[in-house]
Image (tube, helix red, strand yellow):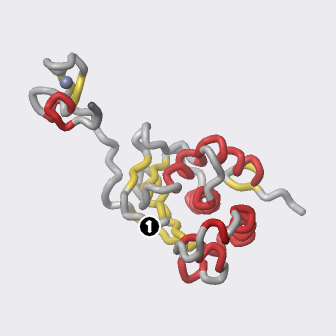
């Protein structure tokens, strides 16, 4: 059998990358790997790609493992919409492709449908079984379309920095006369 190559790597390496980055093999990340693989193939050879992810869960890690787009380098935007979808696009002309988990197609793979819709408790759907189904399904549960990105593509410009008179740490000047933490809006005590 021909070795399956995804995102330029054999399947086993891809799963290992997921395990290392994410801490464990999450089914959503493996599906995300297939999604990225497809989106990259559709995009072709583009020097600088951007990503807009429509959920905070799993998919951002798939983008970070399999593309040069990371949250830290500003090339990945995350929208908290809880939709299992993302777009990869050409940073130059803002044209690209959206790939998503297509629920209608996923119905043909009840394990995946039930997992995604949380219709079965985790203990009744062992990870190996679910992963096996995901490997079988590959792109059969996905859809894609062309998109022209019209928002969320700006790379955030760094704002003015000021030194907080209370704690002495640098902070974003637009937050006011002292840092948010010293204004009592911090997250720790
Ligand atoms: Zn401060």
Q: Return the x and y of residue 83 as percentages of the image width and height.
A: 44, 67
The residue identified by callout 1 is 83
Indicate the quadrant containing the N terminus: top left, top right, bottom left or bottom right.
Answer: bottom right
Residue 148 locus on image (x, y percent): 39, 64
Other residues around mark 1 within 10 Å, as few (<14) / some (14–19) / many (≥20):
some
Q: Quadrant of ligand 1?
A: top left
In the image, is residue 175 above or below residue 129?
A: above
Left or right of 140? Residue 46 is left
Q: Nearer the viewer, residue 154 or 47?
A: 154
Residue 147 appears in the picture as rendered:
yes
Q: How many marks?
A: 1
The residue located at (40%, 56%) in the rendering is 94
- Judged from this view, the residue extending furthest toward the right is 1
Query: Residue at the spot x=33%, y=54% of the render?
Result: 152
Indicate the quadrant where residue 36 lies: bottom right
Label 1's element? loop
Residue 97, given in percent of the width and then of the height, sits at: 49, 64
Q: Quadrant of residue 165?
A: top left
22 shown above or below 130: above
Picture coordinates of residue 86, whole percent (x, y): 47, 61
Q: Nearer the viewer, residue 23 or 142?
A: 23
Left or right: 122 in relation to 148: right
Q: Is residue 37 visible?
A: no
**Which quadrant: the C terminus?**
top left
Q: Residue furthest left?
A: 177
The residue under the point 61% across, 56% down is 26
In this rendering, would 113 be left or right of 185?
A: right
């Amino acid at each position: 059998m021909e070795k399956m190559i995804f995102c330029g790597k054999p399947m086993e390496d891809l799963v290992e990358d997921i395990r290392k980055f994410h801490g464990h093999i999450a089914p959503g990340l493996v599906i995300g790997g297939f999604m990225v693989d497809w989106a990259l193939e559709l995009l072709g050879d583009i020097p600088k790609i951007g990503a807009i992810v429509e959920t905070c869960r799993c998919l951002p890690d798939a983008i970070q493992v399999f593309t040069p787009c990371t949250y830290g380098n500003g090339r990945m935007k995350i929208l908290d919409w809880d939709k299992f979808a993302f777009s990869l696009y050409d940073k130059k002309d803002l044209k690209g492709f959206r790939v998503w988990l297509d629920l209608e197609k996923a119905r043909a793979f009840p394990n995946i449908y039930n997992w995604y819709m949380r219709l079965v408790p985790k203990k009744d759907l062992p990870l190996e079984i679910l992963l096996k189904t995901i490997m079988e399904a590959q792109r059969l549960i996905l859809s894609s379309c062309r998109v022209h990105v019209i928002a969320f593509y700006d790379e955030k410009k760094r704002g003015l920095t000021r030194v907080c008179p209370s704690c002495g740490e640098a902070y974003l000047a637009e937050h006011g006369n002292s840092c948010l933490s010293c204004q009592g809006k911090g997250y720790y005590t």
